[in-house]
Image (cartoon, rainbow, N blue to C red):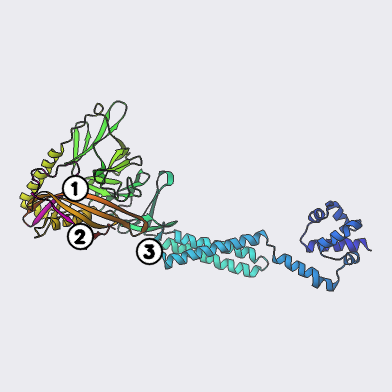
Amino acid sequence: MNSRKTGAFISECRKAKGMTQQELADALGVTNKAVSKWETGGGMPDISLLIPLCEVLGVTVEELMDGKKSEQKVTKKSRIADLKRKKYSLTKKQVLSILCLVLSALGVLMQILYEAVGKRYRLEYMAGWMWYAVNGICLILVIIAVWNLLAEKNKIRYRMTLILLLLCVVNLGAGFLKNENIRDVISISPGFHNIAVMRQNLENGSVVTYRPGILWFVRESNPLPYTADEKLKIQWLEQDVCAITYTSPDDNEVHQYVMTYGVRGNGITSPPVYQVLDGAWVQKDETTVSWALETDVDGVHLRKGNKEYLYGYDDCVQFGTLAMALCHNGLPQWTVSLNKDCIMNNENQGHDFITEGTISLCKVSMAKTAPIILEGGIPEETYEIKPSPTGEEQGKLLVDEMKRMVNSLGEMETLEDSASYLKIVTDSTNPFDIGRMAAEQEDKVRSVNGIDVGVQITSMQLLAGDIYDFLLEVNVTENFSNPENSEEESEADLSRKYRIMKCDDGYLAAPVAIRVDGTYGLEAPAMEQKLETANDSAYYYFVAGQR
Protein backbone atom coordinates (compact mmCIF):
# COMPACT_ATOMS: atom_id res chain seq x y z
CA MET A 1 0.00 0.00 0.00
CA ASN A 2 1.36 3.39 -1.03
CA SER A 3 0.30 6.04 1.54
CA ARG A 4 0.94 8.95 -0.82
CA LYS A 5 -1.07 7.34 -3.65
CA THR A 6 -3.89 6.48 -1.25
CA GLY A 7 -3.85 10.00 0.23
CA ALA A 8 -4.03 11.59 -3.21
CA PHE A 9 -6.93 9.25 -4.05
CA ILE A 10 -8.78 10.26 -0.85
CA SER A 11 -8.30 13.95 -1.76
CA GLU A 12 -9.51 13.35 -5.34
CA CYS A 13 -12.65 11.50 -4.20
CA ARG A 14 -13.41 14.09 -1.53
CA LYS A 15 -13.24 16.95 -4.02
CA ALA A 16 -15.35 14.99 -6.50
CA LYS A 17 -18.01 14.79 -3.82
CA GLY A 18 -17.81 18.55 -3.28
CA MET A 19 -16.71 18.11 0.32
CA THR A 20 -14.16 20.02 2.37
CA GLN A 21 -11.64 18.36 4.67
CA GLN A 22 -13.71 19.54 7.64
CA GLU A 23 -16.93 18.05 6.22
CA LEU A 24 -15.21 14.69 5.64
CA ALA A 25 -13.73 14.82 9.13
CA ASP A 26 -17.15 15.53 10.65
CA ALA A 27 -18.68 12.61 8.74
CA LEU A 28 -16.05 10.23 10.17
CA GLY A 29 -15.79 11.73 13.64
CA VAL A 30 -12.14 12.78 13.33
CA THR A 31 -10.33 16.11 13.07
CA ASN A 32 -9.61 17.90 9.83
CA LYS A 33 -5.91 17.63 10.69
CA ALA A 34 -6.24 13.85 10.50
CA VAL A 35 -7.82 14.11 7.05
CA SER A 36 -5.05 16.48 5.94
CA LYS A 37 -2.44 14.02 7.22
CA TRP A 38 -3.98 11.17 5.17
CA GLU A 39 -4.19 13.23 1.97
CA THR A 40 -0.54 14.39 2.19
CA GLY A 41 0.66 10.82 2.76
CA GLY A 42 1.72 11.49 6.32
CA GLY A 43 -0.40 8.66 7.66
CA MET A 44 -3.13 6.18 6.88
CA PRO A 45 -6.70 5.95 8.25
CA ASP A 46 -7.26 3.61 11.14
CA ILE A 47 -8.52 0.18 10.06
CA SER A 48 -11.82 0.85 11.86
CA LEU A 49 -12.40 3.87 9.61
CA LEU A 50 -11.78 2.17 6.27
CA ILE A 51 -15.35 1.01 5.63
CA PRO A 52 -17.04 4.30 6.80
CA LEU A 53 -14.50 6.26 4.73
CA CYS A 54 -15.21 4.17 1.64
CA GLU A 55 -18.98 4.61 2.07
CA VAL A 56 -18.60 8.37 2.32
CA LEU A 57 -16.33 8.57 -0.71
CA GLY A 58 -18.34 6.01 -2.73
CA VAL A 59 -15.45 3.61 -3.32
CA THR A 60 -14.51 0.09 -2.28
CA VAL A 61 -11.80 -0.87 0.18
CA GLU A 62 -9.83 -2.41 -2.68
CA GLU A 63 -10.01 0.84 -4.66
CA LEU A 64 -8.88 2.78 -1.57
CA MET A 65 -5.89 0.49 -1.05
CA ASP A 66 -4.95 0.63 -4.75
CA GLY A 67 -5.32 4.38 -4.85
CA LYS A 68 -7.45 4.32 -7.99
CA LYS A 69 -10.97 3.44 -9.11
CA SER A 70 -11.89 0.39 -11.08
CA GLU A 71 -13.39 1.47 -14.43
CA GLN A 72 -16.34 -0.95 -14.12
CA LYS A 73 -17.20 0.20 -10.59
CA VAL A 74 -17.24 3.84 -11.61
CA THR A 75 -19.87 3.37 -14.28
CA LYS A 76 -22.11 1.11 -12.21
CA LYS A 77 -22.14 2.46 -8.72
CA SER A 78 -20.29 5.71 -8.22
CA ARG A 79 -21.56 7.48 -11.34
CA ILE A 80 -25.18 6.42 -10.65
CA ALA A 81 -24.88 7.64 -7.07
CA ASP A 82 -23.45 10.96 -8.26
CA LEU A 83 -26.22 11.41 -10.81
CA LYS A 84 -28.85 10.76 -8.16
CA ARG A 85 -27.18 13.23 -5.84
CA LYS A 86 -27.11 15.93 -8.53
CA LYS A 87 -30.71 15.20 -9.55
CA TYR A 88 -32.21 15.74 -6.14
CA SER A 89 -30.00 18.54 -4.80
CA LEU A 90 -30.31 22.27 -5.64
CA THR A 91 -27.89 25.03 -4.84
CA LYS A 92 -29.01 28.31 -3.31
CA LYS A 93 -28.51 30.05 -6.66
CA GLN A 94 -30.72 27.52 -8.40
CA VAL A 95 -33.47 27.98 -5.80
CA LEU A 96 -33.23 31.77 -6.20
CA SER A 97 -33.39 31.44 -9.99
CA ILE A 98 -36.49 29.23 -9.87
CA LEU A 99 -38.18 31.66 -7.49
CA CYS A 100 -37.41 34.57 -9.84
CA LEU A 101 -38.85 32.70 -12.82
CA VAL A 102 -42.03 31.82 -10.91
CA LEU A 103 -42.56 35.44 -9.82
CA SER A 104 -41.89 36.67 -13.34
CA ALA A 105 -44.42 34.19 -14.75
CA LEU A 106 -47.02 35.38 -12.26
CA GLY A 107 -46.36 38.98 -13.30
CA VAL A 108 -46.78 38.09 -16.98
CA LEU A 109 -50.00 36.20 -16.19
CA MET A 110 -51.34 39.24 -14.30
CA GLN A 111 -50.59 41.49 -17.30
CA ILE A 112 -52.36 39.08 -19.66
CA LEU A 113 -55.43 38.90 -17.42
CA TYR A 114 -55.46 42.68 -17.10
CA GLU A 115 -55.40 43.19 -20.87
CA ALA A 116 -57.87 40.37 -21.62
CA VAL A 117 -60.34 40.70 -18.74
CA GLY A 118 -59.54 43.68 -16.50
CA LYS A 119 -60.16 46.38 -19.09
CA ARG A 120 -63.53 44.83 -19.91
CA TYR A 121 -64.58 45.54 -16.31
CA ARG A 122 -63.09 49.07 -16.45
CA LEU A 123 -60.18 48.17 -14.15
CA GLU A 124 -57.00 50.21 -14.40
CA TYR A 125 -53.74 50.37 -12.52
CA MET A 126 -53.79 52.83 -9.65
CA ALA A 127 -51.07 54.83 -11.42
CA GLY A 128 -50.30 54.82 -15.13
CA TRP A 129 -46.63 53.97 -14.59
CA MET A 130 -47.45 50.75 -12.70
CA TRP A 131 -48.08 48.78 -15.91
CA TYR A 132 -44.54 49.54 -17.07
CA ALA A 133 -43.15 48.92 -13.59
CA VAL A 134 -44.57 45.37 -13.58
CA ASN A 135 -42.98 44.76 -17.00
CA GLY A 136 -39.64 46.05 -15.72
CA ILE A 137 -39.74 43.90 -12.57
CA CYS A 138 -40.52 40.78 -14.63
CA LEU A 139 -37.55 41.49 -16.93
CA ILE A 140 -35.18 42.05 -13.98
CA LEU A 141 -36.28 38.77 -12.38
CA VAL A 142 -35.57 36.91 -15.63
CA ILE A 143 -32.13 38.56 -15.83
CA ILE A 144 -31.29 37.29 -12.30
CA ALA A 145 -32.43 33.78 -13.23
CA VAL A 146 -30.43 33.73 -16.49
CA TRP A 147 -27.30 35.03 -14.80
CA ASN A 148 -27.39 32.22 -12.22
CA LEU A 149 -28.60 29.30 -14.34
CA LEU A 150 -26.21 29.92 -17.23
CA ALA A 151 -23.13 30.57 -15.13
CA GLU A 152 -21.07 28.04 -17.12
CA LYS A 153 -22.23 29.34 -20.52
CA ASN A 154 -20.95 32.88 -20.55
CA LYS A 155 -21.61 33.70 -24.19
CA ILE A 156 -25.29 32.75 -24.01
CA ARG A 157 -25.65 34.42 -20.62
CA TYR A 158 -24.17 37.72 -21.81
CA ARG A 159 -26.26 37.79 -24.98
CA MET A 160 -29.55 37.07 -23.21
CA THR A 161 -28.76 39.59 -20.48
CA LEU A 162 -28.02 42.27 -23.08
CA ILE A 163 -31.31 41.58 -24.88
CA LEU A 164 -33.30 41.73 -21.63
CA LEU A 165 -31.60 44.99 -20.60
CA LEU A 166 -32.48 46.53 -23.95
CA LEU A 167 -36.10 45.51 -23.40
CA CYS A 168 -35.97 47.20 -19.98
CA VAL A 169 -34.76 50.43 -21.56
CA VAL A 170 -37.47 50.31 -24.24
CA ASN A 171 -40.14 49.63 -21.59
CA LEU A 172 -38.88 52.53 -19.45
CA GLY A 173 -38.89 54.92 -22.40
CA ALA A 174 -42.40 53.89 -23.45
CA GLY A 175 -43.62 54.57 -19.92
CA PHE A 176 -42.27 58.11 -19.94
CA LEU A 177 -43.62 58.92 -23.40
CA LYS A 178 -47.12 57.48 -22.91
CA ASN A 179 -48.01 59.35 -19.71
CA GLU A 180 -46.40 62.73 -20.29
CA ASN A 181 -49.79 64.56 -20.50
CA ILE A 182 -51.55 62.60 -17.74
CA ARG A 183 -50.89 63.30 -14.07
CA ASP A 184 -51.73 60.68 -11.46
CA VAL A 185 -52.95 62.13 -8.16
CA ILE A 186 -52.97 59.69 -5.24
CA SER A 187 -53.78 60.53 -1.63
CA ILE A 188 -53.95 58.12 1.31
CA SER A 189 -56.26 58.81 4.26
CA PRO A 190 -54.95 59.14 7.84
CA GLY A 191 -54.46 55.67 9.23
CA PHE A 192 -54.18 54.21 5.69
CA HIS A 193 -57.87 53.21 5.66
CA ASN A 194 -58.76 54.55 2.19
CA ILE A 195 -57.07 55.92 -0.89
CA ALA A 196 -58.22 58.65 -3.27
CA VAL A 197 -57.12 58.25 -6.88
CA MET A 198 -57.54 60.84 -9.63
CA ARG A 199 -56.16 61.22 -13.12
CA GLN A 200 -55.74 64.73 -14.55
CA ASN A 201 -55.32 65.55 -18.22
CA LEU A 202 -52.84 68.42 -18.29
CA GLU A 203 -53.87 69.45 -21.81
CA ASN A 204 -57.60 70.07 -21.25
CA GLY A 205 -57.77 70.19 -17.43
CA SER A 206 -60.29 67.34 -17.08
CA VAL A 207 -60.05 65.25 -13.91
CA VAL A 208 -61.50 61.76 -13.45
CA THR A 209 -61.90 60.09 -10.05
CA TYR A 210 -61.42 56.37 -9.42
CA ARG A 211 -62.81 53.92 -6.86
CA PRO A 212 -60.77 51.10 -5.24
CA GLY A 213 -60.97 47.82 -7.12
CA ILE A 214 -58.86 44.67 -6.59
CA LEU A 215 -55.36 44.84 -5.12
CA TRP A 216 -53.64 47.81 -6.83
CA PHE A 217 -56.33 48.18 -9.47
CA VAL A 218 -59.01 50.91 -9.47
CA ARG A 219 -62.26 51.47 -11.35
CA GLU A 220 -63.25 54.72 -13.08
CA SER A 221 -65.95 56.60 -11.17
CA ASN A 222 -66.96 60.20 -11.94
CA PRO A 223 -65.28 63.14 -13.65
CA LEU A 224 -65.12 66.46 -11.84
CA PRO A 225 -67.96 68.67 -13.12
CA TYR A 226 -65.54 71.45 -14.14
CA THR A 227 -62.07 71.47 -15.64
CA ALA A 228 -59.37 72.22 -13.09
CA ASP A 229 -56.11 74.11 -12.86
CA GLU A 230 -53.08 71.95 -12.25
CA LYS A 231 -53.15 72.62 -8.50
CA LEU A 232 -55.61 70.41 -6.61
CA LYS A 233 -56.18 70.79 -2.88
CA ILE A 234 -56.91 67.41 -1.29
CA GLN A 235 -58.15 67.35 2.30
CA TRP A 236 -59.38 64.36 4.31
CA LEU A 237 -62.22 65.53 6.57
CA GLU A 238 -62.56 62.01 7.96
CA GLN A 239 -60.97 58.64 7.24
CA ASP A 240 -63.61 58.01 4.56
CA VAL A 241 -64.38 61.56 3.38
CA CYS A 242 -61.96 63.26 0.96
CA ALA A 243 -62.65 66.82 -0.28
CA ILE A 244 -61.07 67.88 -3.59
CA THR A 245 -60.99 71.67 -4.00
CA TYR A 246 -59.85 73.30 -7.21
CA THR A 247 -60.04 76.48 -9.28
CA SER A 248 -61.64 76.05 -12.69
CA PRO A 249 -60.46 78.02 -15.73
CA ASP A 250 -64.04 77.71 -17.02
CA ASP A 251 -65.24 80.49 -14.67
CA ASN A 252 -62.18 81.26 -12.49
CA GLU A 253 -64.21 80.17 -9.43
CA VAL A 254 -63.41 77.71 -6.66
CA HIS A 255 -65.29 74.40 -6.86
CA GLN A 256 -65.30 71.25 -4.80
CA TYR A 257 -65.98 67.54 -5.21
CA VAL A 258 -66.17 65.15 -2.25
CA MET A 259 -65.29 61.45 -2.46
CA THR A 260 -66.89 59.25 0.21
CA TYR A 261 -66.01 55.64 0.97
CA GLY A 262 -68.11 54.58 3.95
CA VAL A 263 -71.60 54.70 5.40
CA ARG A 264 -73.25 55.57 8.67
CA GLY A 265 -76.38 53.97 10.02
CA ASN A 266 -78.01 51.27 7.91
CA GLY A 267 -75.80 51.62 4.84
CA ILE A 268 -76.63 52.81 1.35
CA THR A 269 -80.22 53.61 2.32
CA SER A 270 -79.02 56.66 4.28
CA PRO A 271 -81.06 59.80 3.52
CA PRO A 272 -79.49 63.15 2.55
CA VAL A 273 -77.10 64.59 5.12
CA TYR A 274 -79.32 67.59 5.93
CA GLN A 275 -82.14 65.20 6.79
CA VAL A 276 -80.19 63.40 9.54
CA LEU A 277 -78.92 66.64 11.17
CA ASP A 278 -81.69 66.97 13.72
CA GLY A 279 -81.56 70.02 16.00
CA ALA A 280 -78.56 72.24 16.77
CA TRP A 281 -74.89 71.48 16.25
CA VAL A 282 -72.35 73.81 17.83
CA GLN A 283 -68.65 74.34 18.26
CA LYS A 284 -67.65 74.98 21.82
CA ASP A 285 -64.60 75.35 24.00
CA GLU A 286 -64.41 75.88 27.73
CA THR A 287 -66.22 79.25 27.72
CA THR A 288 -67.72 80.20 24.36
CA VAL A 289 -69.45 78.89 21.29
CA SER A 290 -68.21 80.12 17.90
CA TRP A 291 -70.04 78.32 15.10
CA ALA A 292 -73.47 76.72 15.15
CA LEU A 293 -75.52 74.79 12.59
CA GLU A 294 -79.25 74.11 12.75
CA THR A 295 -81.81 72.68 10.34
CA ASP A 296 -85.49 73.52 10.06
CA VAL A 297 -88.17 73.81 7.40
CA ASP A 298 -86.37 76.77 5.77
CA GLY A 299 -83.09 74.95 5.30
CA VAL A 300 -79.69 74.89 6.99
CA HIS A 301 -78.84 77.82 9.28
CA LEU A 302 -75.16 78.56 9.87
CA ARG A 303 -74.43 81.04 12.66
CA LYS A 304 -71.43 82.77 14.15
CA GLY A 305 -72.11 85.44 16.74
CA ASN A 306 -74.70 87.82 15.31
CA LYS A 307 -74.16 86.67 11.75
CA GLU A 308 -76.43 84.08 10.18
CA TYR A 309 -76.29 82.38 6.80
CA LEU A 310 -79.26 80.46 5.41
CA TYR A 311 -78.88 77.73 2.82
CA GLY A 312 -82.09 76.35 1.37
CA TYR A 313 -82.27 72.63 0.73
CA ASP A 314 -81.89 73.36 -2.97
CA ASP A 315 -78.49 74.84 -2.08
CA CYS A 316 -77.36 71.59 -0.40
CA VAL A 317 -75.40 69.37 -2.80
CA GLN A 318 -75.15 65.77 -1.62
CA PHE A 319 -71.97 63.67 -2.02
CA GLY A 320 -72.50 59.97 -1.41
CA THR A 321 -74.15 59.40 1.96
CA LEU A 322 -71.60 61.17 4.18
CA ALA A 323 -71.14 64.75 2.98
CA MET A 324 -72.84 67.78 1.47
CA ALA A 325 -71.76 71.18 0.23
CA LEU A 326 -73.59 74.37 1.24
CA CYS A 327 -73.72 76.53 -1.88
CA HIS A 328 -74.54 80.13 -2.71
CA ASN A 329 -75.34 81.03 -6.32
CA GLY A 330 -74.20 77.56 -7.31
CA LEU A 331 -70.75 77.87 -5.71
CA PRO A 332 -69.74 75.81 -2.64
CA GLN A 333 -69.00 77.80 0.50
CA TRP A 334 -68.96 75.15 3.21
CA THR A 335 -68.63 71.36 3.40
CA VAL A 336 -70.44 69.32 6.06
CA SER A 337 -69.47 65.69 6.69
CA LEU A 338 -70.59 63.04 9.16
CA ASN A 339 -67.75 61.87 11.39
CA LYS A 340 -67.01 58.27 12.31
CA ASP A 341 -68.49 58.66 15.80
CA CYS A 342 -71.98 59.43 14.46
CA ILE A 343 -74.59 56.99 15.73
CA MET A 344 -77.84 56.68 13.80
CA ASN A 345 -81.24 55.88 15.23
CA ASN A 346 -83.59 54.22 12.76
CA GLU A 347 -86.92 55.33 14.17
CA ASN A 348 -89.80 57.39 12.83
CA GLN A 349 -90.93 55.39 9.80
CA GLY A 350 -87.49 54.14 8.82
CA HIS A 351 -85.71 57.51 8.53
CA ASP A 352 -82.28 57.79 10.16
CA PHE A 353 -81.31 60.56 12.58
CA ILE A 354 -78.02 61.17 14.35
CA THR A 355 -78.51 60.60 18.05
CA GLU A 356 -74.88 60.88 19.11
CA GLY A 357 -71.56 62.02 17.64
CA THR A 358 -69.99 64.95 15.82
CA ILE A 359 -69.91 66.49 12.35
CA SER A 360 -67.20 68.44 10.52
CA LEU A 361 -67.76 71.89 9.02
CA CYS A 362 -65.03 73.11 6.67
CA LYS A 363 -64.69 76.30 4.64
CA VAL A 364 -64.31 75.75 0.89
CA SER A 365 -61.12 77.55 -0.07
CA MET A 366 -57.85 76.94 -1.89
CA ALA A 367 -56.07 78.30 1.18
CA LYS A 368 -55.22 76.07 4.10
CA THR A 369 -58.33 75.32 6.19
CA ALA A 370 -59.03 73.18 9.22
CA PRO A 371 -62.33 71.36 9.83
CA ILE A 372 -64.50 72.75 12.64
CA ILE A 373 -65.94 70.00 14.83
CA LEU A 374 -69.57 70.55 15.80
CA GLU A 375 -71.33 68.63 18.55
CA GLY A 376 -75.01 67.83 18.81
CA GLY A 377 -77.27 67.82 21.86
CA ILE A 378 -75.91 71.05 23.38
CA PRO A 379 -77.73 72.11 26.61
CA GLU A 380 -79.81 75.27 26.37
CA GLU A 381 -77.81 77.00 29.09
CA THR A 382 -74.68 76.66 26.93
CA TYR A 383 -76.18 77.76 23.66
CA GLU A 384 -79.38 79.64 23.15
CA ILE A 385 -81.11 77.56 20.51
CA LYS A 386 -83.83 79.28 18.57
CA PRO A 387 -87.06 77.40 19.33
CA SER A 388 -87.97 75.13 16.44
CA PRO A 389 -91.36 75.81 14.82
CA THR A 390 -94.09 73.39 15.76
CA GLY A 391 -95.30 70.84 13.25
CA GLU A 392 -98.34 72.99 12.49
CA GLU A 393 -96.19 76.12 12.02
CA GLN A 394 -93.86 74.25 9.68
CA GLY A 395 -96.87 72.90 7.80
CA LYS A 396 -98.19 76.44 7.34
CA LEU A 397 -94.81 77.64 6.05
CA LEU A 398 -94.73 74.77 3.56
CA VAL A 399 -98.28 75.41 2.32
CA ASP A 400 -97.72 79.18 2.02
CA GLU A 401 -94.58 78.64 -0.06
CA MET A 402 -96.31 76.10 -2.32
CA LYS A 403 -99.27 78.44 -2.90
CA ARG A 404 -96.89 81.27 -3.71
CA MET A 405 -95.10 79.09 -6.27
CA VAL A 406 -98.34 77.81 -7.82
CA ASN A 407 -99.65 81.37 -8.22
CA SER A 408 -96.36 82.56 -9.73
CA LEU A 409 -96.64 81.55 -13.39
CA GLY A 410 -93.05 82.41 -14.28
CA GLU A 411 -91.58 80.45 -11.39
CA MET A 412 -93.57 77.30 -12.18
CA GLU A 413 -92.53 77.41 -15.83
CA THR A 414 -88.82 77.46 -14.91
CA LEU A 415 -89.05 75.15 -11.87
CA GLU A 416 -86.57 72.28 -11.89
CA ASP A 417 -86.99 69.23 -9.69
CA SER A 418 -85.09 69.39 -6.39
CA ALA A 419 -85.08 67.66 -3.04
CA SER A 420 -87.71 70.16 -1.82
CA TYR A 421 -90.16 70.58 -4.74
CA LEU A 422 -91.18 68.40 -7.68
CA LYS A 423 -93.15 69.48 -10.74
CA ILE A 424 -95.48 66.74 -12.03
CA VAL A 425 -96.58 67.37 -15.61
CA THR A 426 -99.71 65.26 -16.22
CA ASP A 427 -103.40 65.47 -17.15
CA SER A 428 -104.31 62.71 -14.70
CA THR A 429 -106.79 63.38 -11.90
CA ASN A 430 -105.99 60.14 -10.08
CA PRO A 431 -104.11 60.99 -6.86
CA PHE A 432 -102.43 57.58 -6.81
CA ASP A 433 -101.01 57.99 -10.34
CA ILE A 434 -99.73 61.42 -9.33
CA GLY A 435 -98.19 59.96 -6.17
CA ARG A 436 -96.35 57.31 -8.18
CA MET A 437 -94.87 60.02 -10.45
CA ALA A 438 -93.81 62.09 -7.43
CA ALA A 439 -92.05 59.13 -5.79
CA GLU A 440 -90.13 58.25 -8.96
CA GLN A 441 -89.10 61.85 -9.60
CA GLU A 442 -87.86 62.24 -6.03
CA ASP A 443 -85.74 59.07 -6.32
CA LYS A 444 -84.19 60.37 -9.52
CA VAL A 445 -83.26 63.66 -7.83
CA ARG A 446 -81.75 61.86 -4.85
CA SER A 447 -79.99 59.08 -6.73
CA VAL A 448 -76.67 58.17 -5.12
CA ASN A 449 -73.46 57.89 -7.13
CA GLY A 450 -73.09 54.35 -8.47
CA ILE A 451 -76.10 52.92 -6.56
CA ASP A 452 -79.09 51.53 -8.47
CA VAL A 453 -82.50 51.29 -6.82
CA GLY A 454 -85.55 49.27 -7.74
CA VAL A 455 -88.75 50.51 -6.07
CA GLN A 456 -92.02 48.68 -5.61
CA ILE A 457 -94.82 50.88 -4.27
CA THR A 458 -96.68 48.59 -1.89
CA SER A 459 -99.60 50.86 -0.93
CA MET A 460 -100.86 54.45 -1.06
CA GLN A 461 -103.44 56.28 1.02
CA LEU A 462 -105.09 59.68 0.69
CA LEU A 463 -104.75 61.17 4.18
CA ALA A 464 -106.41 64.55 3.61
CA GLY A 465 -107.72 66.99 0.98
CA ASP A 466 -109.00 66.53 -2.56
CA ILE A 467 -107.52 66.39 -6.07
CA TYR A 468 -106.74 70.13 -5.98
CA ASP A 469 -104.75 70.02 -2.74
CA PHE A 470 -104.08 66.80 -0.87
CA LEU A 471 -101.67 64.84 1.37
CA LEU A 472 -100.73 61.38 0.12
CA GLU A 473 -98.87 58.63 1.96
CA VAL A 474 -96.74 56.34 -0.22
CA ASN A 475 -95.27 53.11 1.22
CA VAL A 476 -92.44 51.51 -0.75
CA THR A 477 -89.97 48.63 -0.70
CA GLU A 478 -86.62 49.74 -2.07
CA ASN A 479 -83.89 47.37 -3.28
CA PHE A 480 -80.46 48.97 -3.51
CA SER A 481 -77.56 47.46 -5.46
CA ASN A 482 -74.14 48.37 -6.76
CA PRO A 483 -73.43 46.86 -10.21
CA GLU A 484 -69.71 47.01 -9.47
CA ASN A 485 -69.96 45.25 -6.09
CA SER A 486 -72.48 42.44 -5.69
CA GLU A 487 -71.97 42.44 -1.91
CA GLU A 488 -73.27 46.00 -1.64
CA GLU A 489 -76.99 45.22 -1.67
CA SER A 490 -79.76 46.22 0.71
CA GLU A 491 -83.53 46.33 1.05
CA ALA A 492 -85.66 48.77 3.06
CA ASP A 493 -89.36 49.38 3.66
CA LEU A 494 -90.02 53.13 3.82
CA SER A 495 -92.99 55.44 4.16
CA ARG A 496 -93.19 58.84 2.47
CA LYS A 497 -95.67 61.69 2.47
CA TYR A 498 -96.27 64.27 -0.26
CA ARG A 499 -98.25 67.49 -0.15
CA ILE A 500 -99.54 67.95 -3.70
CA MET A 501 -101.24 71.04 -5.22
CA LYS A 502 -102.85 71.52 -8.63
CA CYS A 503 -101.20 74.04 -10.96
CA ASP A 504 -101.83 75.09 -14.58
CA ASP A 505 -100.04 72.25 -16.39
CA GLY A 506 -99.93 69.59 -13.70
CA TYR A 507 -99.11 69.44 -10.01
CA LEU A 508 -96.55 70.75 -7.53
CA ALA A 509 -95.42 68.09 -5.03
CA ALA A 510 -93.34 68.58 -1.90
CA PRO A 511 -91.92 65.75 0.24
CA VAL A 512 -93.17 66.27 3.79
CA ALA A 513 -90.62 65.82 6.59
CA ILE A 514 -91.57 63.85 9.67
CA ARG A 515 -91.88 66.84 11.99
CA VAL A 516 -94.04 68.79 9.54
CA ASP A 517 -97.85 68.69 9.75
CA GLY A 518 -98.67 67.94 6.13
CA THR A 519 -102.43 68.10 6.75
CA TYR A 520 -102.38 71.83 7.48
CA GLY A 521 -105.48 73.47 5.99
CA LEU A 522 -106.94 70.15 4.79
CA GLU A 523 -109.82 67.97 5.94
CA ALA A 524 -109.78 64.22 6.20
CA PRO A 525 -111.66 62.40 3.40
CA ALA A 526 -115.22 61.28 4.08
CA MET A 527 -114.22 57.67 3.53
CA GLU A 528 -110.90 55.83 3.45
CA GLN A 529 -109.16 55.96 0.08
CA LYS A 530 -106.36 53.39 -0.04
CA LEU A 531 -104.75 51.42 -2.88
CA GLU A 532 -102.78 48.17 -2.40
CA THR A 533 -100.12 47.83 -5.11
CA ALA A 534 -97.57 45.35 -3.70
CA ASN A 535 -98.13 42.91 -6.59
CA ASP A 536 -98.86 45.47 -9.30
CA SER A 537 -95.95 45.82 -11.76
CA ALA A 538 -97.38 49.15 -12.93
CA TYR A 539 -96.24 50.60 -9.62
CA TYR A 540 -92.64 49.39 -9.94
CA TYR A 541 -89.84 51.55 -11.30
CA PHE A 542 -86.04 51.47 -11.53
CA VAL A 543 -83.63 54.38 -11.03
CA ALA A 544 -80.01 53.97 -12.13
CA GLY A 545 -77.39 55.59 -9.92
CA GLN A 546 -75.44 58.57 -11.22
CA ARG A 547 -72.14 57.61 -12.88
Give the Cα separation between the discs numbered 3 and 2. 33 Å
* Circles 3, 1 touching at the beta carbon (< 8 Å): no
Residue nearest the viewer, comparing 183 with 109? 109
Identify the residue position indicated by label 2 in the image. Answer: 539
N-terminal of the two: label 1 or label 2?
1
Which mark is drawn over residue 314? 1
The quarter holding residue 398 reads top left
Residue 164 placed where, x, y %?
Answer: 55, 66
N-terminal of the two: label 3 or label 1?
3
Q: What stretch is highlighted in magenta?
A: 505-533
Which residue appears at 17% of the width and 46% of the height? 512
Residue 529 placed where, x, y %?
Answer: 12, 53
Which numbered mark, 1 or 2, is in the foreground of this view?
2
Residue nearest the viewer, comparing 130 with 405? 405
Which residue appears at 38% of the width and 63% of the height? 121
Give the Cα separation between the discs numbered 3 and 1. 35 Å
Give the Cα separation between the discs numbered 1 and 2. 28 Å
N-terminal of the two: label 3 or label 2?
3
Q: Is residue 430 above or below residue 513?
A: below
Tag 3: residue type? Tyr
